[in-house]
Amino acid sequence: MSFSSPPNQQAYYEQVWAITRLIPRGKVATYGQIAKMIPPPNGVEIEAYAAFAPRWVGGAMANCPDDVPWQRVINSQGKISERPGAERQRPLLEAEGVIFDAKGKLDLKKFGWSGKNEDNIPKQAAMF
């Protein structure tokens, strides 16, 4: 089964945006980390969800409202993914105190968000 987008795209994106709004200044989360915070939609098996969800998070970031700190979401290597607008991401993160090495990588142990305020993460509703 192939899922190029979540079954209920808008509802999924809203969950992604709500989680992204919780990431503090000077911290980052990965696409996969955010995906793991959202339960699989009804009808999507766990294995399929694990394969597609980080891309769905990327889709949400590409379509987020202005109040979502999109710059705080990076790839699992601690780098900025190449895509339209990527050149704006590093200066925004550096303005928040995030430091990149010479290879364009940041230290996820230092700048990674633990998600410890997960009590504020929206729970899965029967929307899928």
Image (tube, rainbow, N blue to C red):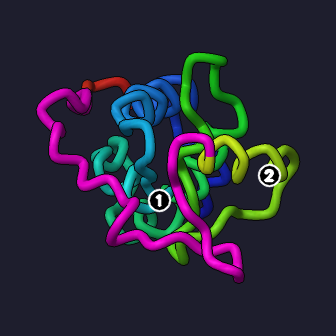
Q: From this view, report whether residue 5 is shown above or below residue 49.
A: above
Q: From this view, report whether residue 64 is shown above or below residue 111.
A: above
- Helix, strand or loop status at disc 1: strand
- Identified at 25% across, 25% down, the residue is 125
- Identified at 55% across, 25% down, the residue is 68
Q: Residue furthest bottom?
A: 103
Which one is nearer the viewer's eye here, 11 or 68?
68
- Identified at 55% across, 32% down, the residue is 69
Q: Residues within 10 Å of mark 2 (few under 14, many from 20)?
A: few
Asked whether 30 falls inside the magenta stretch, the response is: no
Which one is nearer the viewer's eye here, 38 or 45?
38
For residue 10, which quarter of the picture?
Answer: top right
Read off the residue under disc 1. Answer: 30
Q: Nearer the viewer, mark 1 or mark 2?
A: 2
Looking at the image, residue 100 sits to the left or right of residue 11; the answer is right
Read off the residue under disc 2. Answer: 86
Q: Residues within 10 Å of mark 1 (few under 14, many from 20)?
A: many
Q: Which residues are magenta?
A: 95-124
**Does the magenta stretch mainly form a helix, a strand or a loop?**
loop
